[in-house]
Amino acid sequence: MRKFFNKNPYLMFLLPGIIVYSVFVVYPILSAGYISFFQWNGYGPKEYVGLQNYKDLFTNSNLMSQLGNALKNCLTIFFLSVIIMMPIQIIMAYTIHSKARGSSFFQVAVFSPQFISTPVIVFIFTLLFDGSFGIVNKVLRETGFGNLARPWMGIPEYGIYVIWFMMTWAGMGVGMVYFIGAMKMISGEMIESAYVDGAGFWKRLWYIVIPQIKGTIFNLILTSYIISMTIFDFNYILGGSGGGISGSVDTLALMFYRTAFGENSPLGGKVSVNAMGMGTTIACVLFLMVFVVAICQIVLMFRTKKED
């Protein structure tokens, strides 16, 4: 053993990290996969059922309905984040990178919500969107758009969009900082040459900056997908473990939580003899959804780099 580490001394530095990662990440994943093949309520003996849990998940109408609704909400958050939030982050990042007046203050202001806890953010937006005294409705009425005023927090169809708006406000600064870091790697001479040749702000952004930060864009799309598929805290605080009115803010993580911990059995009732078995099955399906997409995107990113 000593000879092995003498020949590979770098492994001594990697070993503590590998051990911690294996105990707290690899083992729980493998353990969840193992439990998903059993009928188990979380304590007492397990009964091996093979793939029956997976079959029940995709054939039980109640579970399938919840799974489809939760997946739809997760994908809604993801597509809104990529189509709307990410372009705004890129524009703000380039504005700050260009040293526009007040850019330092603007950067701090946009990033500052990161220091506010999720319950406080939900409370703030609950007040903003309140149907009776919320500022949003008050502004709409004062500006002549009173017909657009709504009890935003009480309409199921708007629930997931309110959640996305909260997440966007809270996380806008993180992606912006990543893009600023990527833009600092771009040659200043290239941008200056384009400026001298008459290229305006938007042309420099589209033809020079964005092609140079494709790797960061790919990484943040993947990060947005992972966050959207595993979002829990905003939805739980706003809608409870049931996912709000008619499951309007339900997510896959919430579905796992209420199934595994007693509020939603595989047949739609209360505590189930198979709560933990079905719960870990849902968790494994969620893991595969994230893992497969992540691998595909990483492969695509490496192929794009080789072509470049």
Image: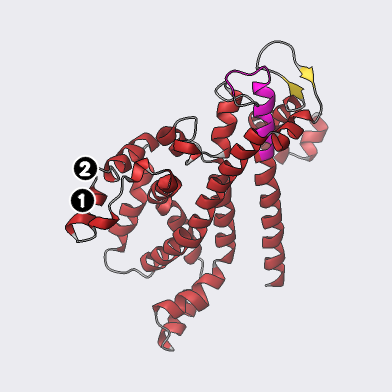
Q: Tell me the magenta residue range.
A: 269-285
Kind of residue indicated by mark 2: Phe
Which quadrant holds residue 89? bottom left
List the residue tagged with mark 2: 133
> Which of the two residues, 76 or 293, is positioned nearer the viewer here?
76
Question: Magenta part mainly helix, strand or loop?
Answer: helix
Residue 12 appears anywhere in the view: no
Residue name at image x 44 percent, y 56 percent: 177
Where 29 falls versus 99 (above or below)?
A: above
Is 17 contained in the magenta span?
no
Instruction: Identify the mark at residue 138; answer none if there is no mark.
Output: 1
- Split into 4 quadrants, where in the image is the N terminus? top right
Residue 84 is situated, as x and y percent measured from the top left of the image, at: 45, 61
> Which of the two residues, 85 or 109, is positioned nearer the viewer here?
85
Where 57 falls versus 166 (above or below)?
A: above
The furthest residue to the bottom: 197
The furthest residue to the top: 44
Residue 74 is situated, as x and y percent measured from the top left of the image, at: 55, 46
Kind of residue indicated by mark 1: Lys
- Split into 4 quadrants, where in the image is the C terminus? bottom right
Which quadrant holds residue 67? top right
Evaluate if marks 2 and 1 touch, with contact meaning CB atoms under 8 Å apart: yes
Where 257 falls versus 69 (above or below)?
A: above
Is 281 contained in the magenta span?
yes
Task: Label 2: state its secondary structure.
Answer: loop
| Chain-order first, disc 2 or disc 1 | 2
> Which of the two residues, 64 or 262, is positioned nearer the viewer here?
64
